[in-house]
Amino acid sequence: MRLKFSTKLVLVNILVAAVVAALIGFIVIQGLMLILINNTVTNLTTVANESTVLIRQSIYSLATTDPAETVYIQNADFYATQIASVYSSNIVLFDNSMHAVGSNMNLEDFSMYTDYVSQVSESREQSYVYTQTDGVNSILFLSPVFITSKSQPVGVMLIIYPTSNMDLIIRYTTYLFIGGGFVSAAVVFATRKII
């Protein structure tokens, strides 16, 4: 069966439009992911900074002669629970020996995070990783906990932020692009008789 020239032209146009739409869709989805991750990291930076202030104020308010690191370790579960309840995220607090000393989670083994914690403890800089934890995409945001600005950190705070809402936005945006592509192809194909 031979196709008419106009049908060939329409099919080539559909193919070109599909390739261009796929390229634009890819760029838009990647840009959307970048924006969503950057906004989330900005929010988590604020959470970590405010949480560090909360811990610092709590340690100062106790007016104890114990070293700050000891007070931090003794009250780590309380700090983690309070921070988690305020910011609706899972919090794990580590000491300088890379041991989890406080958490609002019921897990007992946090060894999977020690490499990240070690890097943050050594660099004394905030860091994040976009990863999959227990089958759920998450951003692991790590921040050293300083009691005074020039001191050695007393530990590292890990904020485990699930990205399920972000993943849903990306999935629906992808569906919209695919659906729009099919509708466009159907319109072009349906109007081939007019050409």
Image (spheres, rainbow, N blue to C red):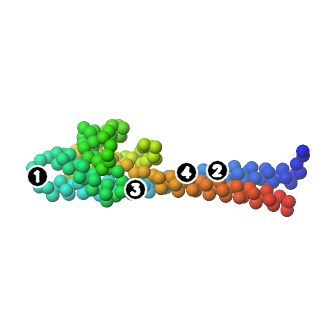
Mark 2 crowdedness (10 Å alpha carbons): few <14, some 14-19, many ≥20: few
Q: In this view of the protein, which residue sits in the foreground, 102 or 121? A: 102
Q: Residue at x 68, y 52 (%)?
A: 20
Among numbered discs 4 and 3, the one appearing first in the sequence: 4
Mark 4 crowdedness (10 Å alpha carbons): few <14, some 14-19, many ≥20: few
Q: Where the N terminus falls, by quadrant?
A: top right
* Numbered mark located on residue 30 in the image: 4
From the image, tell me which residue sits under label 1: 64
Q: CA distance from mark 4 to mark 3?
A: 18 Å
Mark 3 crowdedness (10 Å alpha carbons): few <14, some 14-19, many ≥20: few
Q: Position of residue 55 (x, y in %)?
A: 23, 54
Among numbered discs 2 and 1, the one appearing first in the sequence: 2
Mark 1 crowdedness (10 Å alpha carbons): few <14, some 14-19, many ≥20: few
> Given the image, on which type of amino acid does mark 3 rest?
Thr
Q: In this view of the protein, which residue sits in the foreground, 161 or 51? A: 161
> Given the image, on which type of amino acid does mark 2 rest?
Leu
Asked whether residue 163 appears in the rendered view, the answer is yes
From the image, tell me which residue sits under label 2: 23
* Numbered mark located on residue 42 in the image: 3
Judged from the image, the secondary structure of the residue bearing numbered disc 1 is loop
Judged from the image, the secondary structure of the residue bearing numbered disc 2 is helix
Among numbered discs 4 and 1, the one appearing first in the sequence: 4
Judged from the image, the secondary structure of the residue bearing numbered disc 3 is helix
> Given the image, on which type of amino acid does mark 4 rest?
Gln
Quadrant of res 111: top left
Q: CA distance from mark 1 to mark 3?
A: 34 Å
Nearest to viewer (mark 1 / mark 3): 1
Q: Are marks 2 and 1 in contact (CB under 8 Å)?
A: no
Quadrant of res 47: bottom left
> Given the image, on which type of amino acid does mark 1 rest?
Thr
Nearest to viewer (mark 4 / mark 1): 1
